[in-house]
Amino acid sequence: MSDSDDDDIPRLSSHTLAALQEFYAEQKQQSDAGRDDKYNIGIIEENWIMNITKIACVSAPSVYQKLRALHREDFSVYIFEYDKRFAIYGEEFIFYDYNNPLDLPEKIAAHSFDIVIADPPYLSKECLRKTSETIKYLTQGKILLCTGAVMEEEAAKLLGVKMCKFIPKHTRTLGNEFRCYVNYDSGLDHEI
């Protein structure tokens, strides 16, 4: 594959990569549950994908691609994304512009997703506020938000989420500390 072919391939943002790392950490945690070492982040009380039938990935295309690659028939996953290259996924792609948070197709009913995984495209209060409108419209309750640690207070105020003790690792150095936030018992808050 040439370098020019690589330009058309969707890339993982550092924020969505962190959400994916959270998923892998949870899977590793389940397999390591019997081990007692200082690096174990706790036993996951709930397999976050169990009993979930509909997942929305808002501005989180990497997570969407990884979930889709699982080829599971017991859940469906949709990508809400500005980048129209993701339209290759057909009806699972929903064009999304955070500047118009509720400008969604009629087929997307309020509170129709078991969990919303979101990675706002910009680290700003305005972007988080607008993305939060979308999240609250889509979710039946569960929210997994990936954004900077500096957004902790705003995320709690807007979505009722709490910062997880789990800290995502990145292959690149970020200018801001990146964190995951949830509003449900995800198993990511156990003591090390």
Image (cartoon, rainbow, N blue to C red):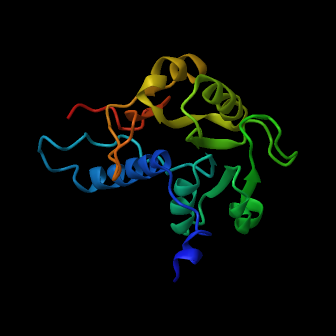
Identify the image quadrant of residue 74: bottom right
Residue 136: x and y, percent? 68, 30
| Image position of 172 (left or right of 78) | left
Residue that extends furthest to the right in the rendered view of this protein: 106
122 in relation to 78, above or below: above
| Image position of 17 (left or right of 40) | right
Residue at coordinates 51% horizontally, 38% vertically from top-left? 144
Residue at coordinates 55% horizontally, 69% vertically from top-left? 71
Residue that extends furthest to the bottom in the rendered view of this protein: 1
Residue 65: x and y, percent? 56, 62
Tally of marks: 0
Of residues 85 and 23, the one drawn nearer to the viewer in this rendering: 85
Identify the image quadrant of residue 131: top right
Residue that extends furthest to the left in the rendered view of this protein: 37
Residue at coordinates 71% horizontally, 50% vertically from top-left? 82
Residue 81: x and y, percent? 68, 50
| Image position of 47 (left or right of 93) | left
Of residues 144 and 29, the one drawn nearer to the viewer in this rendering: 144
Residue at coordinates 41% horizontally, 27% vertically from top-left? 149
